[in-house]
Image (spheres, grey):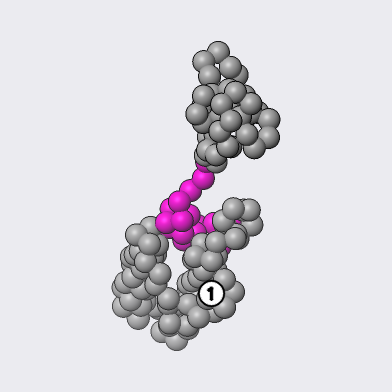
Amino acid sequence: MAFCASCGAPMEGRFCAKCGATAGAAAPPPPGAYAPPPVAAAPGLTDNAASALCYLLGVITGVVFLVLAPYNQNKTIRFHAFQSIFLWVACVVIWVGISILHMIVIGATYYGGGFGFLLLITSLIHLAMFLFWVFMIVSAYQGKRIVLPVIGPLAEKQA
């Protein structure tokens, strides 16, 4: 039920029966009248937080944010989710390539003579991948949209 903005009387229609004012902005109900409780805002994540969380667990959180209803409608979050999935796939491909290289070096040297150097290079690559992962999380949380060279355009097309 609407109440008159001028006198607070209950209104049925466009005009107040008590003072004749037209229905405009609804005034609060008079003291003692029932007023429904205010509706709280729906809980959820901000776009920045959801974008950063897309990178947290790679494919898992990327797919989660592509499935969850309020987030799968947002183009920014969809972009970060797809880019996170594609980035994880690229990291797995690099890891498999490094593992194959390890097997080749160990097999070629028989006693693993080049293994120490390869272990150092591999450790540096893994450190660089970790730092890049942290960089992507922080950048997404700050609202920056970093489009990676190969997988970024693919993610933009999907989003």
Quadrant assignment, res 120: bottom left
Is 46 colored magenta in this rendering? yes
Looking at the image, which residue is at 58% across and 37% down? Answer: 23
Q: Position of residue 135 (x, y in %)?
A: 34, 64
Q: Is residue 33 left or right of residue 152?
A: right
Total count of labels? 1
Q: Examine the rendered structure and indicate whether residue 13 appears above or below residue 150.
A: above
Nearer the observer, 124 or 2: 2
79 inside magenta stretch = no
- Which residue shows up at 58% across the image and 30% down it? 20
Q: Which residues are magenta?
A: 43-64
67 over 12 or under it: above or below: below
Which of the 4 image quadrants contains residue 115? Answer: bottom left
In the drawing, does residue 70 fall left or right of residue 108? Answer: right
Label 1 Cα crowd, 10 Å radius (few <14 / some 14-19 / many 20+): many
**Residue at horizontal 51 percent and vertical 31 percent from the top:** 5
Residue 77: x %, y % from top left: 51, 62
Q: Report the residue marked by disc 1.
A: 155
Residue depicted at 59% across the width and 60% down the height: 73
Q: In the structure shown, which secondary structural element does the residue marked by tag 1 occupy?
A: helix
Viewer can see residue 119: no
Q: Main secondary structure of the magenta part?
A: helix
Q: Amino acid at mark 1?
A: Ala
- Residue 154 is situated, as x and y percent measured from the top left of the image, at 54, 79
- The image shows residue 148 at horizontal and vertical percentages of 42, 77
Against 3, residue 144 (above or below) is: below
Instruction: Tell me the quadrant of the picture where the C terminus can be found.
Output: bottom right
The residue most toward the right is 12
